[in-house]
Image (cartoon, rainbow, N blue to C red):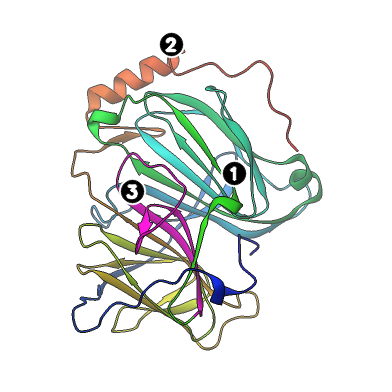
Amino acid sequence: MPAVSASDLLVLPRIERPDPGTTTYRPVSQVITSPSFLEGAGFPVRRPFPGPYGNIADPFLLLDHIGAIEYAPGEARGAPWHPHRGFETVTYIMDGAFRHTDSNGGGGLITDGATQWMTAGAGILHDEMPTDELVQKGGLFHGTQLWVNLPARLKFTPPRYQDITADRVALLSSHDGGVLIRVIAGDLDGHKGPGVTHTPIAYAHATLAPGAALEIPWRPDYNALVYVLAGRGTAGLDREPIDDGQLAVLGAGDALTLTADDLQDSRSPNLDVLMLGGQPINEPVVSYGPFVMNTRDEILTAIRDYQAGRMGIIPAVHLPHL
């Protein structure tokens, strides 16, 4: 996957290895194999949460993993115009490209390691569509979309769009240079990603070479989730196996440890994972499709506001799809 990389990991800032004498490594409490769904105009996603597992991810609401998939000409699908209120959408593209347009004037091309961070807040309309080239010619596509909740006091914050290009992502390596870490948002061991967040979270993509291990400090007041984008490995000191499309939910502690299997499939030569964590909001969540609020009455208001055009108007002139 051509997400942003580095030619020499040994010159990157390094994550300090936690002191094993004073560190509590988080155990794996649960491993979830993602069920599959059709989303948008009909593209397949794997969705590890939400699901019938309880409140495992607060402040995160949803994670969709799209691909990796090889589209034939004419097969690529997107998500046409739709509304959102009450949370943020974070779209991270590793292969292929999506073009985003919204009713607030935000938009752009998301491709090869770039991230689109859209704060819906009080309400916005947007679409996310494959480029004309991907539709016409087909090709490889691989990406994720994460939904980040907003606390009640920020549900009606003004909409905001962040275009986080691949060259802005903070690149780090493990203490021995066997792991590349891309920090998209939050703070890992004092290294900050470019994403500006309304709620305290950490969001990173790590690539572990075969046989490599990662030990990384993790804020004890954050939850911790590890999602496998590709490859095989283990999580925790008990070396719980994790595989492509699985989510490891980690327990309490102040550090994470992951290890890549020595042997990987030729299609996935490394173990690639998303590392997610955040400070739980601990508020009621009432959702209806693209709206996430705290009460049923707020959902009904969101529906009425959308129907009345108070969440924005689809632009008369759309940005061209490159």
- Residue 262 at x, y = what percent? 51, 88
* Relative to 274, 225 lies left or right: left
Amino acid of disc 1: Gly
**Residue at (47, 13) in percent of width and height:** 309
Placement of 124 over or under 266, stated as above or below: above
Label 1 residue SS: loop
Give the residue furthest to the top. 308
* Relative to 58, 261 lies left or right: right
Which residues fall within the magenta stretch? 177-206
- Camera-nearest residue between 194 and 298: 194
Distance Cα–Cα, label 3 vs label 2: 29 Å
Label 3 residue SS: strand
Quick check: is 116 in the magenta stretch?
A: no
- Residue 311 at x, y = what percent? 44, 18
Task: Read off the residue under disc 1.
Answer: 42
- Residue 274 at x, y = what percent? 45, 62
- Residue 249 at x, y = what percent? 30, 65
**Label annotation for residue 303:** none
- Camera-nearest residue between 163 and 177: 177
Task: Read off the residue under disc 3.
Answer: 60
Task: Read off the residue under disc 2.
Answer: 308
**Residue at (53, 54) in percent of width and height:** 169
Q: Residues within 10 Å of mark 1 (few under 14, many from 20)?
A: few
Amino acid of disc 3: Phe
Amino acid of disc 2: Ala
